[in-house]
Image (cartoon, helix red, strand yellow):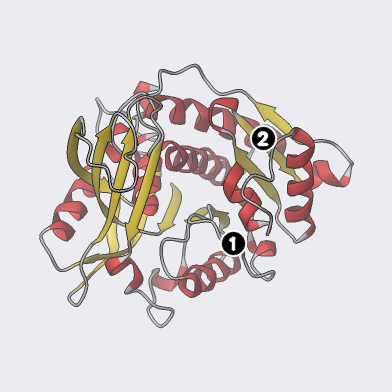
């Protein structure tokens, strides 16, 4: 079995769809409001589970997806655990913390563009610590996925544990922030959007505007030890560069986005990461395939999955299953 471990956030999403974002001091009637399950970690786990399973068949899969994190001792925690377990995710690594509330995210979706704005309250996500053995025996499987919605020290500590055990480490550094230099060499894959790429590299958030900018950013990350840099570009597709190609002075590659009617972009990036991890884990389990071909195929698969996600409203509710791709 291929094994993917996701260490990250679990949130209750409170989503308001509005014709536009109100100005300061303005009251505006929204189009709709609903609650659902989210958090970047949870979304990525759901994406990995669904894109490796068929909605119409049994939940058994050749890919095991394990979620690691924490929820609060409130009405939301057990409901979220049950919901994700129904998608076939191993939730035994999710702790219930009695002195915390489940994390929350307030999401504004602008109807005219599908663009979202998110306010995140950590809650139980920040109740985990480096003193806890979050992953039994530090066995993260074939691929380990991390974000930055849980404490930085916990993320960095477990990245090093995962790498030491032989897992391919994916870091999606959101919320975007600069990273310590000793983390970059631990990363098999750094997955960022344009804004995150600039911020993580210590540049202004609008620093990326051309292919040459992307090549320069990728070179900076690779120079610090990252093996592969992937930059998602929304409707413009995906840019990616490898340390091997960069060493031969080759420019990064680009793949176009799929055509989609955009309704809500909330979970698109998370879907990309989860689906991408599935193909990496499958290749690692079989120990076959040229590394460049595996990367090309994994990114193309992830683009298709993300393209389906933006056509539906919501976070986890919008993530497609394998037979929908």
- Earlier-in-chain disc, 2 versus 1: 1
The secondary element bearing badge 2 is classed as strand
What separation in Å lies between label 2 and label 1 (alpha carbons)? 26 Å
Residue 92 drawn above or below residue 160: above
* Residue 251 image point, x, y percent: 82, 35
Q: Which mark is residue 166?
A: 1
The secondary element bearing badge 1 is classed as loop
Q: Which residue sits at x=48%, y=25%?
A: 304
Q: Which residue sits at x=52%, y=29%?
A: 303
Is residue 24 or residue 232 the one in the foreground?
A: 24
How packed mark 2 is, by other alpha carbons closer than 10 Å (few <14, some 14-19, many 20 or more), is many
Residue 115 location, quadrant: top left
Give the label, 2 or 1, closer to the camera: 2
* Residue 110 image point, x, y percent: 35, 32
Q: Is residue 62 visible in this depiction of the protein?
A: no
Q: Which residue sits at x=47%, y=61%?
A: 148
Q: Which residue sits at x=63%, y=42%?
A: 230
Q: Which residue is mark 2?
A: 239
Residue 80 drawn above or below residue 211: below
Is residue 166 or residue 260 the one in the foreground?
A: 260
Q: Is residue 18 left or right of residue 216?
A: left
């Amino acid at each position: 079995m291929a094994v993917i471990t996701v260490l990250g956030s679990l949130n209750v999403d409170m989503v308001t769809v509005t014709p536009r974002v109100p100005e300061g001091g303005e009251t505006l009637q929204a189009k709709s409001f609903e609650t659902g399950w989210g958090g970047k970690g949870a979304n990525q786990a759901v994406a990995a589970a669904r894109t490796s399973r068929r909605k119409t068949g049994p939940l058994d899969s050749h890919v095991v997806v394990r979620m690691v994190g924490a929820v609060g001792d409130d009405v939301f925690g057990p409901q979220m655990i049950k919901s994700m377990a129904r998608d076939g995710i191993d939730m035994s690594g999710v702790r219930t913390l009695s002195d915390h509330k489940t994390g929350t995210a307030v999401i504004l979706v602008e109807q005219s563009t599908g663009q979202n704005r998110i306010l995140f309250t950590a809650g139980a996500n920040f109740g985990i610590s480096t003193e806890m053995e979050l992953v039994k025996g530090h066995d993260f499987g074939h691929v380990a996925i991390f974000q930055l919605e849980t404490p930085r020290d916990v993320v960095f500590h477990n990245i090093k544990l995962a790498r030491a055990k032989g897992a391919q480490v994916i870091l999606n550094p959101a919320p975007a922030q600069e990273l310590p230099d000793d983390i970059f060499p631990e990363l098999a894959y750094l997955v960022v959007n344009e804004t995150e790429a600039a911020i993580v590299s210590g540049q202004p958030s609008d620093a990326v505007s051309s292919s040459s900018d992307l090549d320069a950013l990728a070179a900076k990350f690779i120079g610090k030890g990252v093996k592969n840099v992937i930059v998602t570009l929304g409707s413009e597709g995906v840019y990616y560069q490898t340390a091997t190609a960069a060493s031969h002075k080759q420019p990064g590659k680009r793949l176009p986005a799929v055509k989609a009617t955009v309704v809500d972009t909330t979970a698109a990036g998370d879907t990309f990461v989860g689906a991408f991890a599935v193909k990496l884990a499958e290749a690692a389990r079989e120990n076959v395939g040229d590394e460049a071909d595996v990367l090309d195929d994994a990114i193309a698969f992830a683009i298709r999955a993300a393209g389906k996600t933006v056509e539906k409203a919501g976070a986890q509710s919008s993530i497609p299953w394998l037979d929908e791709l």
